[in-house]
Image (spheres, helix red, strand yellow):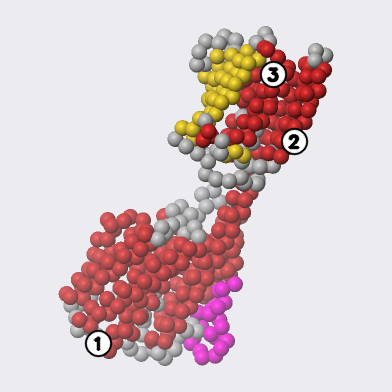
């Protein structure tokens, strides 16, 4: 297949790569089975126009088409990402997408040559290996460029002028280095062979600084420059043996392509990891800021409750200070945890309500109930505290009020309902700017699984309800922040 004279003198023209293989594989990955006729028909008509026997004209294109589709199927089964987002994807493309199916296609095409009488059986393995090498090289070099362009990663959408200019300078250096390395006449000297590696420093530079798109384009420039000059009997890989020349240039192409793409994919993975770490650090800092808002707010409310007892009941005030000290010690310990069991959160709630009871005496009635299966559910510490404080603040009207907290499990989610008495004109929607409630909403968004939410409503006249639903926790044990 391809445009190769496989036998002849040293000046014979041959193609070290077959780009159509890479275009065909990329098209199959992007478009699916509908592209198969577009792979088969050009090969069929090309062979037909060359006057090849019918058996070769039909079977060889059919085998190549089947091999390309098999490669696409293998990549899909291995969950290959067409964006080439990791070194794993690069290796999958080189192996399952290029080397394996193109090896089968090369053997099939060489066999078709033998069956049709176009080649003696003695040349089967050498021709099959050349087909395999040229098709594999074309796939590894061309397919990444096509896939990156199709996925929108080839050029940045909002590239700055100096970034584009720097990329073009780097790519220009790669092309110049490749041209210098391969434009000379063939020579057996070691220095001439060493020129083949002249593009490598620039290729590594591009891969590390500009990522996979620029590296893929650089590989394309180096390989096509090398292929163009080697096909014209120029460059360090040309020798008196056609097969030897092909295998030298194929080895070079394999090294250039895999090195450039793997280095670039690895560099991009590190960039993404650093970006994720920065986002995680930002979220952690935000959560700590929210905790810093909640804890002083909670302390102020507790101290305010004790202050109301100092003049009226000194013994109760002393008991309140003792309870507050114990409660603060516990909250400080729990605040070091990213997630705590719901049972420990309820202990804090009960202690808080006992302190509030000291302040309001008979004016506050409260109850806390929870199903047994809620105790081990993990949630951020002090998440319910602002809800309870808000319920006490708005629920005790003229010194009298009632608060009820009920918790249950629904389809694996924790559902907490906080109800309190409230004046008829209370508007829960106006509480959104409250510091405590704002922190609850922010912490739900940042620290709870997606779908968790807090809703306020008026279930009955004179009652207000806060309903907190936390989706099923993904983590089964405590975690340090």
Q: Disc 3 and disc 2: Cα gap in Å?
A: 20 Å
Q: Position of residue 261 (x, y in %)?
A: 50, 66
- SS of the residue under disc 2: helix
Q: Which residue is mark 1?
A: 121
Q: Quadrant of the N terminus?
A: bottom left
Q: Disc 2 and disc 1: Cα gap in Å?
A: 87 Å
Q: Nearer the viewer, residue 110 or 286?
A: 286
Q: Quadrant of residue 180?
A: bottom right
Crowd class of label 3 (few under 14; some 14 to 19; many from 20; radius 10 Å): some
Tell me if label 2 and label 1 are in contact, CB under 8 Å: no
Q: Is residue 432 above or below residue 249?
A: above
- Residue lying at 59% horizontally and 63% vertically, measured from the top left: 208
Q: Disc 3 and disc 1: Cα gap in Å?
A: 98 Å
Task: Say whether residue 4 is left or right of residue 423.
Answer: left
Which callout, 3 or 1, points at the residue further toward the start of the chain? 1
- Residue lying at 52% horizontally and 66% vertically, measured from the top left: 262
Task: Say whether residue 366 is left or right of residue 10.
Answer: right
Which is in the foreground here, disc 2 or disc 1?
2
Which callout, 3 or 2, points at the residue further toward the start of the chain? 2
Is residue 198 shown in magenta?
A: yes
Is residue 247 shown in magenta?
A: no
Q: Quadrant of the C terminus?
A: top right
The part of the chain drawn in magenta is 180-201
- Residue lying at 41% horizontally and 64% vertically, measured from the top left: 143
Visible residue check, residue 429 = no
Q: Nearer the viewer, residue 7 or 125?
A: 125
Q: Is residue 43 above or below residue 210?
A: below
Crowd class of label 2 (few under 14; some 14 to 19; many from 20; radius 10 Å): few
Q: Which residue is mark 3?
A: 357
- SS of the residue under disc 3: helix
- In the rendered image, the residue lying farthest to the left is 54
Q: Which residue is mark 2?
A: 329
């Amino acid at each position: 297949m391809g445009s190769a004279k496989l036998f002849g003198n040293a000046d014979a023209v041959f193609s070290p790569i077959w780009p159509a293989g890479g275009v065909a594989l990329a098209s199959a990955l992007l478009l699916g089975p509908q592209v198969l006729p577009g792979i088969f028909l050009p090969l069929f008509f090309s062979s037909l126009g060359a006057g090849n026997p019918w058996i070769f004209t039909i079977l060889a294109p059919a085998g190549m088409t089947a091999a390309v589709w098999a490669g696409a199927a293998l990549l899909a089964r291995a969950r290959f990402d067409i964006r080439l987002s990791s070194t794993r994807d690069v290796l999958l493309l080189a192996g399952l997408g290029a080397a394996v199916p193109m090896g089968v296609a090369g053997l099939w095409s060489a066999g078709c040559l033998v069956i049709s009488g176009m080649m003696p059986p003695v040349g089967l393995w050498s021709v099959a290996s050349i087909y395999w090498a040229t098709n594999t090289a074309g796939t590894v070099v061309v397919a990444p460029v096509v896939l990156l362009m199709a996925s929108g990663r080839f050029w940045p959408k909002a590239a700055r002028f100096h970034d584009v200019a720097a990329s073009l300078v780097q790519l220009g250096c790669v092309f110049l280095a490749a041209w210098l390395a391969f434009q000379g006449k063939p020579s057996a000297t070691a220095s001439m062979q060493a020129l083949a590696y002249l593009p490598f420093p620039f290729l590594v530079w591009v891969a590390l600084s500009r990522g996979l798109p620029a590296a893929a384009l650089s590989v394309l420039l180096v390989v096509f420059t090398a292929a163009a000059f080697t096909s014209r009997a120029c460059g360090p890989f040309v020798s008196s043996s056609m097969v030897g020349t092909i295998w030298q240039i194929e080895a070079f192409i394999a090294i250039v392509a895999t090195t450039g793409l793997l280095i670039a994919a690895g560099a991009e993975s590190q960039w993404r990891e650093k970006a994720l770490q920065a986002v995680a650090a930002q979220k952690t800092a935000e959560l700590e800021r929210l905790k810093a808002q909640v804890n002083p707010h909670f302390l102020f409310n507790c101290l305010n409750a004790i202050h109301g007892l100092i003049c009226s009941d000194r013994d109760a005030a002393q008991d309140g200070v003792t309870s507050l000290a114990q409660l603060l010690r516990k909250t400080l310990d729990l605040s070091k945890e990213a997630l705590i069991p719901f049972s420990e959160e309820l202990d804090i709630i009960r202690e808080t309500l006992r302190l509030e009871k000291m302040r309001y005496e008979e004016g506050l009635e409260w109850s806390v109930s929870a199903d047994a299966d809620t105790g081990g559910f993990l949630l951020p510490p002090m998440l319910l505290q602002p809800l309870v404080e808000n319920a006490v603040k708005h629920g005790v009207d003229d010194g009298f009020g009632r608060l009820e907290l009920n918790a249950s499990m629904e389809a694996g989610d924790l559902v907490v309902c906080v109800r309190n008495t409230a004046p008829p004109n209370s508007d829960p929607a106006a509480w959104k700017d409250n510091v405590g409630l704002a922190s609850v909403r922010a912490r739900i968004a940042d620290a709870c699984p997606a779908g968790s939410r807090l809703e306020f409503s008026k279930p009955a006249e004179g009652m207000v309800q806060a309903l907190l639903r936390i989706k099923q926790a993904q983590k089964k044990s405590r975690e340090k922040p």
